[in-house]
Amino acid sequence: MENVPRVGVAVFVLRGKTVLLGRRRSSIGDSTYALPGGHLEFGESFEECAARELKEETGLDIQKTDFLTATNTIFKEPKPAQYVTIFMRAMLDNPQQVPQTLEPDKCYGWDWYNWEDLPNPLFWPLEKMVQSGFNPFPAE
């Protein structure tokens, strides 16, 4: 297959001043911390994709899903790939929900991290956003 851009949807699930991150098990960005998300399926809205991917990966349900930004990232390794990533923001339906690791072949586990004290290393696209001063939290 020739190199064609793929569309991914990542979701900032916010709880207080924390964000949900998982440690990736992947050929791209292995062992880095990343947002939940995945590939946009044909006919799906960004909101539907965010909710589906989060449910598949963590078992969590969300509400109040908003579009935040989009990025265009070119990965050179392990093989060339281009991703347009749609970043969404959402709140939990029930703040008492606990994330589960439902895809252990893709993620070591999920946890809540304070935005001011994120773990290292971050997945490259997320690290770039953080370094640029991006803040996923709504203005107060």
Image (spheres, helix red, strand yellow):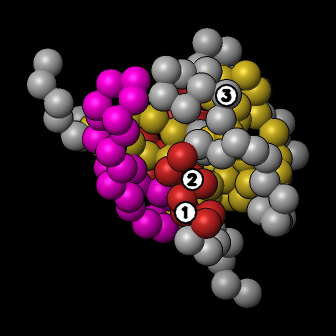
- Magenta-colored span: 67-88
Write the residue at 45% across / 35% down: 38
- The tag on residue 31 is 3
| 85 drawn magenta | yes
Q: State the residue lying farthest toward the bottom.
A: 140
Residue 139: x and y in percent read 67, 84
- Residue 79 is left or right of residue 61, and the answer is left
Q: Which residue type carries mark 3?
A: Ser
| Secondary structure mostly taken by the magenta-highlighted segment of the chain | strand
Tell me the residue that label 1 is attached to: 129
Q: Secondary structure at mark 2?
A: helix
Tell me the residue that label 2 is attached to: 126
Write the residue at 61% across / 12% down: 105
Quadrant of the image containing the N terminus? top left
The answer to whether the residues at label 2 and label 1 have Cβ atoms under 8 Å apart is yes
Q: Residues within 10 Å of mark 1 (few under 14, many from 20)?
A: few
Q: Which residue type carries mark 1?
A: Met
